[in-house]
Image (cartoon, helix red, strand yellow):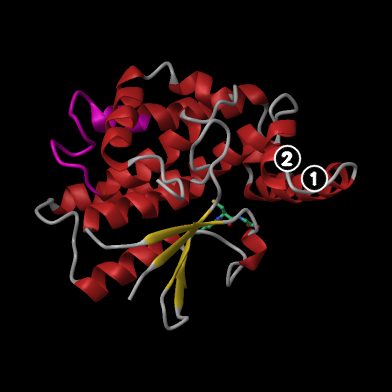
Amino acid sequence: MTMKLHIFKAAWGGMQPSNLCLKVDVWLQMAGLDFERVASNLASRAPRRRVPFVRFDDGSWIDDSEVIIATLSARHGIDVDAGLSDAERGLTRAAQRMIDEHMFFMLIDSRWNDDSVWPRVRDNFLGPWPMPLRLLVGMIFRRGVRRRIRLQGFGRYSPAERHQKTEDNLRALDQILGDKRFMLGDVPRSIDAAAYGMLAAIHFADLETSLATTLRRFPRLVAHTLRMEARFGRGIAGQ
Ligand SMILES: N[C@@H](CCC(=O)N[C@@H](CS)C(=O)NCC(=O)O)C(=O)O
C-alpha cells in the first residue's frame, strides 16, 4: 500500500512553503515509512481543505499533521522519541505547539501581511490564474488570511511587538538547541521535525521577510536548519 503525502508545490527558490507539510515529511523519513509526495497548490481539494494530509490506496485519508503522526505512530508501533525522558517529551509537545499554533501565525503574517513580499506570495499560489483575475482572487484570499491572523490575535500587535514575540520564540528554540547537533542530542527527534519545518520555511524562501532577517541573528538555528536539510531535504515533490 503506497501512502501519498499531499503537500504544496515547491515555492520561492525551491522549498516547501508549508512548515506543517515539511514536519510530516521529515517525520515519515525518521519513521522509515515509504511514501510518495503529491504536490498541489489547491488546498481546497483536500478532504478538509487543508494540507498536509495522507491518502492510502483504499481511499482512506488522515489530515492534521499532529494526528497523522500520532495515528501512524500507533498503527506501525513507531516511536521516534524512544528513550527520551518525560521532561524531554513534555518539552517536545510544548515546543511543537508553540511552533504549529503560534509561530505559524508569525509565518503567514510575514508573508501575507507585508506589502513588499505579498506580490510574490500571491503569484506563487495563484500563478496559473490570468491577470487581472489573479489580482482580484489574490485580494480576496489575502483579506481572508489577514482576518484569520487578526482573529487569532497576532495581527493586532504593532510591528515592534510582533518582532519582539518572533524573536522570543526563536530564542526559545535556540536555547533548547544550545550547542547540540539536534534539539535533544546527537539524534534528530520529532521536535527537530517540527522545528525544521518552521525554520526551513523561513530560511529557504528567497523572500526577504522580517522573520528571515530575525532568524539570521541565531546562527545556531541556521546551522541546525542546514544540518536537517542535508539529512532530510526540503520536502519537495520529485525530490
Ligand atoms: N492543524 C493543521 C493545520 C493545517 C493548515 O493550517 N494547513 C494550511 C497550510 S500550512 C492550509 O492548508 N491552509 C489552507 C487553508 O486554510 O485554506 C495541521 O497541523 O496540519
Q: Position of residue 218 (x, y in %)?
A: 37, 19
Name the mark on residue 147: none
- Of labels 1 and 2, earlier in sequence is 2
Query: Is 89 one of the magenta-colored residues?
Result: no
160 to the left or right of 135: left
Q: Position of residue 135 (x, y in %)?
A: 85, 41
Q: For the N terminus, give its image quadrant.
A: bottom left
Question: Between 130 and 26, which is closer to the camera in this rendering?
Answer: 130
Q: Is residue 192 above or below residue 226?
A: below
Q: Quadrant of residue 215?
A: top left
Query: Is 175 one of the magenta-colored residues?
Result: yes
Q: Check disc 1 and give the amino acid type.
A: Gly
Q: Is residue 37 above or below residue 94?
A: below
Give the crowd class for mark 1: few <14, some 14-19, many >=20 residues within 10 Å. many
Q: Position of residue 156 (x, y in %)?
A: 69, 37
> Residue at position x 50%, y 30% from top?
166
Q: Is residue 186 above or below residue 217?
A: below
76 to the left or right of 104: left
Q: Which residues are magenta?
A: 172-189
Q: Secondary structure at mark 1?
A: helix
The reply to whether the C-beta atoms of the residues labelled 1 and 2 are less than 8 Å apart is: yes
Q: Is residue 81 above or below residue 19?
A: below
Q: Position of residue 212 (x, y in %)?
A: 51, 24
| Residue under label 2 | 122
| Residue under label 1 | 138
> Residue at position x 42%, y 66% from top?
4
Q: Check disc 2 and give the amino acid type.
A: Arg
